[in-house]
Image (cartoon, rainbow, N blue to C red):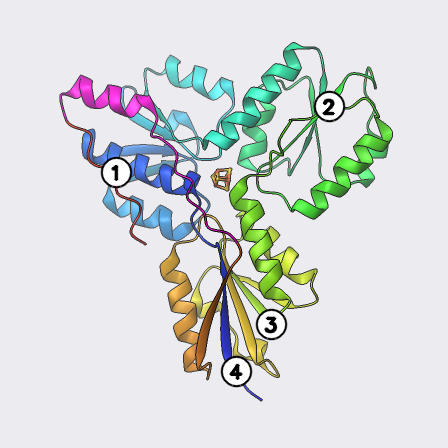
Amino acid sequence: MGLKEVVLAGPRGFCAGVERAIEIVEEALEVVGAPIYVRKEIVHNRHVVDALGAKGAIFVDELDEVPPGATVVFSAHGVAPEVRERSRGRGLRVIDATCPLVTKVHLEAIRYARAGYTIILVGHEDHDEVIGTMGEAPNRIHVISSPEEVEQLELPDPDKVAYLTQTTLSVDDTRAVIDALRQRFPQIVGPSRDDICYATQNRQAAVKTVAGEVDVVLVIGAANSSNANRLREVSETTGSRAYLINEIKEIKPSWFENATRVGITAGASTPEFLVHEAVEALRRMGAVSVREVNVVDENVRFGLPRELEEIAQELGRPLPARVPPAW
Ligand code: SF4
């Protein structure tokens, strides 16, 4: 007995929305210069936030902490329209790093609200993304997160209901909620393609495959990262033990007693260097081989927001070449 093998789930780690958000802050720092203000954590990972902070980004909770006339970046999770209005009122220069797949959900909310639908948003009501989407039609959106809540919904017109979902939910759990919604509101409509994003789906599919082959799964990610928490839950559905860690020093050797194989995955906002550190820690505990199980190749890349180009032109500075975050 004893640790023998580490199995890496692929894809894992940074998604296209997170890479883009980090690149936006880095490019803004080059074009405008420090400080660049960022409303909320640009992505839910302390290592990323600290690294950008060291380069001159200042993270704030709300816009009144940003001096008038300064440049502010909105995080990948998106913002409510009211935040955009306040930024205009304060004369701020805004660069929007909202992931295009989150923007898609906002646009769906606007479309359904304009057409007179009551919207059921499946998600976690305290998450930044859900708060932003809610802001598009606060009087028309109800947030739920479980099938049990479907029964308690009291809606003005049960025949005019639409559903949307947060992008980082568990695929299986969300299907159960949508099934319950369909049963209670047979006329319900939803987006033609699922709102759970490609990165969330791929990372969950990969960790499910790996979790079935190992005794323990390590999910590397922040405690406030929705998609990292879902990776831990998905791993546990296969019967494996799973632990969410943000730092390698949180690893406890007792987790691997009687274990021969350990799986590793990382949330969409987790830098890859933490995966390397975890592999090295497990090697020191006796693992002799490392294998990767890749369930799908990803080649998604999003364009940068046009504000960045406009600011570069206004300041007469060239936009630096795009470089994927080197973590
Ligand atoms: S997890 Fe999905 S929705 Fe969120 S930033 Fe990444 S690609 Fe965009």
Among the two numbered marks 4 and 1 on one chain, the one whose residue lies closer to the N terminus: 4
- Label 3 Cα crowd, 10 Å radius (few <14 / some 14-19 / many 20+): many
> Mark 4: which secondary structure?
loop
According to the picture, the residue beneath numbered tag 2 turns out to be 189
The Cα–Cα distance between marks 4 and 2, rounded to whole angstroms, is 49 Å
Say whether marks 2 and 1 touch (CB < 8 Å). Answer: no
Q: Amino acid at mark 2?
A: Val
Q: Which mark is residue 214?
A: 3
* Residue 146 in sight here: no
Q: Position of residue 67 (x, y in %)?
A: 30, 24
- Residues rendered magenta in the picture: 296-317
According to the picture, the residue beneath numbered tag 1 turns out to be 322
**From what the image shows, is residue 192 above or below residue 267?**
above
> Mark 2: which secondary structure?
loop
In the rendered image, the quadrant that contains the C terminus is: bottom left
According to the picture, the residue beneath numbered tag 4 turns out to be 3
